[in-house]
Image: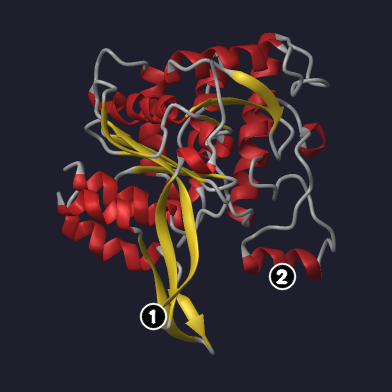
Amino acid sequence: MSYPLTLSRSEELAVVERNGWVESRHAGAAVVVGRDGNIITELGDSRASIFPRSTLKPFQTLASMRAGVPLRGAHVALASASHVGSFEHQRAALEMLHLANLDESALQCPTAWPKHAETRLEMSRTTGEPNRLAFNCSGKHAAFLMACVENGWPIENYLDPKHPLQQAVLETVEEFTESPLANIAVDGCGAPVPAIELVGLARATSKLAAAPGDQSSDARAATIATAMLDYPWAVQGHGEENTVVMEELEVISKLGAEGVLILGAPDGTACAIKMLDGNGRAATLVGLTLLANAGAISVEKVQEVLPKVVPPVLGGGQPHGKIRLARPVMDLLED
């Protein structure tokens, strides 16, 4: 029976310290699994169910590809992305739509201003309005539409949970997570999102990350993992957290809204995290630390990357604190 993550089922994972005083605390759950799917490390209740939000995107991409979408290169990564909406991202999403003889008007994700500052400024000077290509899920939606065209499915209701494409997505998610699906909700982009066990999300990430080195794995999953690492700019954006982790550590990194994060090392060691307060600013710090503690990545390399991906605590524009690991995580490192 599925049940939600609650405070009583959580552990404190990180704290925000300002001038030596703990200002904020982030509780949640984190789990690390090995290639065999067995739990290596668990903080909080990893069998509690969460909405995985955009961490599902690689598996939604997989469902689209299984439906016959001939994605290649950066388009694979963009379908799996929560991108910042740069002109580079928008052009790639439009290319995908053109392959299906569609244009931006077919997208049913919301309109948005880009998070990418230079693109947002230029758009404000020119078009003066947001668009759907700039929405962070536009690549996923373009892949959805390509799948519909490829199979002759209707595009008008491609986000309906009963649509053949969304049924295929849910089947793929259930297969990879080995987790019961509960409470099918509506994600921020309008697509269906099921609640799944956090440990199931970690196991799915393990399968994805290990796929390129496993000849018995799903070849399309291997393609997705390889594309995310080959085109990390497409998955989020130059200098952005997920992109930096993939560029420098060769670890699959994918954020989700409301404090969700997945990380997958090439050997299949994988981590899934849910911050209960929905704030993901400490998730990469916790996740990379747990992967390094499991021996999946180098401690030294993690220490080099963390200053680039963990936001500073500033006062007057100068450092006056830090985001640091909470005691339950530190206790694991000291064992």
Closer-to-camera residue (124/301): 301
Q: In which quarter of the image is residue 181?
A: top right
Name the residue rendered at 24%, 29% in the picture.
34
In the rendered image, residue 278, in percent from the top left (x then y), is placed at 58, 50
**Colour scheme in use:** secondary structure
In the rendered image, residue 97, in percent from the top left (x then y), is placed at 69, 32
In the rendered image, residue 244, in percent from the top left (x then y), is placed at 38, 56
Q: Is residue 272 above or below residue 301?
A: above
Q: Is residue 219 above or below residue 305?
A: above
Closer-to-camera residue (39/165): 39
Mark 1, residues whose alpha carbon is within 10 Å: few (<14), some, or many (≥20)? few
Query: Which numbered mark, 2 or 1, is in the foreground of this view?
Result: 1
- Disc 1: which residue: 20
CB under 8 Å between discs 2 and 1: no
| Label 1 element class | loop
Task: Name the disc covering residue 166, or none.
Answer: none
Task: Answer left or right for 264 relative to 181.
Answer: left
Task: Answer left or right for 285 relative to 185.
Answer: left
Specify the amino acid type for callout 2. Leu
Q: How many labels does the image show?
A: 2
Name the residue rendered at 58%, 26% in the picture.
195
Specify the amino acid type for callout 1. Gly
Task: Name the disc covering residue 121, or none.
Answer: 2
Mark 2, residues whose alpha carbon is within 10 Å: few (<14), some, or many (≥20)? few
Closer-to-camera residue (37/137): 37
| Label 2 element class | helix
